[in-house]
Each structure stands twice: as C-alpha cells, then as structure tokens.
Image (tube, rainbow, N blue to C red):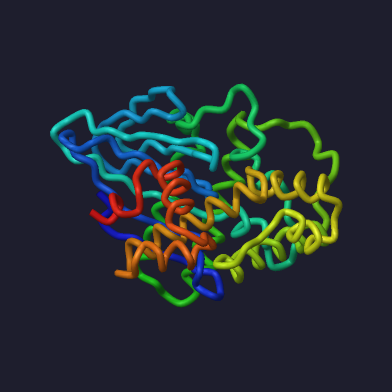
Amino acid sequence: MVLDESYIYTFDKNNYLMKVMHECIQQKDIPYRSTSTHCFRIILIQDGEGSVVINNDRLDIIKNDILVLNNTESYKINSLTNKELSIFTLVFEPSFVSSLDNYSFDLKYLKVFIDRNNDFKNLVCRDNTATKKVLFLILEIEKEFHNKNKNYKLMSKVHLLHILVLLSRYYHYINRMPQQNPFTKEKILSVCKVINYMNENIASSISLSELTQLSNMSQSNFAKAFKELNGIPPMEYLKRKRISYGIQLLTNTDRTVLDIALSCGYNNTSNFNRTFKQLVGKTPRELRK
C-alpha cells in the first residue's frame, strides 16, 4: 500500500522527472507488483523482512537492503513476517540525469541500469563499504522531500548523482570498456528535445518518423542514441510514459476512463485498457477500486 508520494514535475506538469514514495506491505497482502514504466528505480527496505522476485529470480530482503531496477525489470515484493515491510522508493526519468545543465553528461551515470556486466546483482552488496554511503544519501533525499527547504529539488538531484557515481565506482556491476561514441552536447540536446516534445504532446498522435525528424538524426542513429540514454526504444518509452500519466490521472482525479485515455494519446478506451492491463497488470477501473 502506498502511504505517500512526492514529485518533481516537468515544466508543464504532465509528467514527473522524479518521484519518491513510502509503501508498506503486510504478510496478508497480495505481493506488491510493480508496473512496467519508462523510469529507473532505487528501492530501500526501511524495516521488516521479505522477499522480492525480479524477472522470476527470488531474493530475500532485510532492513537497509537496497535494490536497483531498470525499466525492463518487473518485480514482486512480499513480507515474510507479521511485521510490516516498509519501503522507500526513488523513481526517476533517465532524462532527469542526462539533461544536466552544462551538458557534460557521462553515460557512466546510467550504466548501472543500462550497461551491466555478468556480476551485476539487483540487490546492492551488503558488505561493500560504499553501501553505507549509498544508504545515507537515499535517506538524505527522503529528508529533502519531507522538509522541502529552498532548492530541495536541486539537492535531491545532487544526491542522486552522487549515488550513481558510487554505484559506478565501487561496485563491479558495469562494463568497463571505453565508450566508443561518447555523447556530444548535440546528441543529448536532441534526445532531450524529443522527450520534451513527448511531454508537451502526450495527448496527440506521435510517430517514430516524427520523432526521428525532430532529432535531426537518421532513424538508426536516433533509435540507438535514445535507447542508450533511456534503456528502451523511443516508442516503447512513449507508450510507458502515456500509461504512467494515466495512472497519475486515475489516482488523483475523478475524470472518466475515456477522458483519461484521450488525454494520454489513445483515441478509444479499448486500446488504452489493453495497453494499461499489459503494463500494469490491472485495468484502469480495477486500479481505482
């Protein structure tokens, strides 16, 4: 059960760049099932004991465990004791990291999500000396969102970048081969421009050719650059972004399912319901119950 959520929104507030949420799971509950999303996740187990199934692999989890999940991994969490399992989750758009103000973006920030080696484990190593620092930074982000002091959004981003640097530097989770085609300022700007276009036109019909033309790249180069920065292809990203926006509207408004479907870029409820069920595991009406 989600206890509370806080957001850093895009300028138009149609989508969020970062979300933090507190959840609790009891033993009697149906195991918590994630939705397929366009975002990356870092999950902290704040209290209790349980298990998590990630793409059919089961792991035991205890207090202060940290999980790292990309946008291709589904998971289910279950409490194993009578005590509530308390969870704090960071959810963020890849573009929240890649759209750095000075454009000095290094792909290593996101490699733990999109360029892993065979040693990677979703459960961050408990014995690594850097894990205490990662835990501290996650809790600092929680404090920033709770207190909402001046520039808390910027400070949350700074802490997130620090976490990603630690995961890259002190854990043997990522491929160490040099990046063959480093991202230029122009490539980052092009991909960010496309994502901004998606945000601003989420209710409209958008084609791959339209996005490719906007990027000023060939279709193959655009598709490769987009996936390297965001973990999934552009049209899959758009589909998941639409459904994430739909969840937001279903949860926070009393608008009809048809009205929400239209606002998410679907011209009928049939296509919206089918895609929603595929990604969320429930229909829109079931989510609202």
Residue 220 in picture, x, y percent from top left: 82, 45
Query: Residue sitting at 60 percent across and 50 percent down?
Result: 237
14 or 98, nearer to the observer: 14
For this view, does 266 lie left or right of residue 33? right
On screen, residue 140 above or below 58: below
Q: Is residue 141 visible from the viewing direction of this image?
A: no
Q: What residue appears at the point 80 percent right and 57 percent down from the top-left corner?
A: 187
Q: Residue 144, percent across and down?
A: 41, 65
Q: Is residue 123 visible?
A: yes
Does residue 87 lie above or below 189 as drawn? above
Q: Is residue 286 above or below residue 155?
A: above
- Quarter occupied by residue 206: bottom right
Q: Nearer the viewer, residue 221 or 157?
A: 221
Marks counted in the figure total: 0
Q: Position of residue 248 (x, y in %)?
A: 40, 62
Which quarter of the image is occupied by the C terminus? Answer: bottom left
Residue at left offset 66%, top offset 67%: 197
Give the x, y percent position of residue 272. 46, 54
Q: Residue at x 48, y 51 (%)?
A: 271
Q: Is residue 225 left or right of residue 86?
A: right
- Above or below: residue 199 compared with residue 31: below
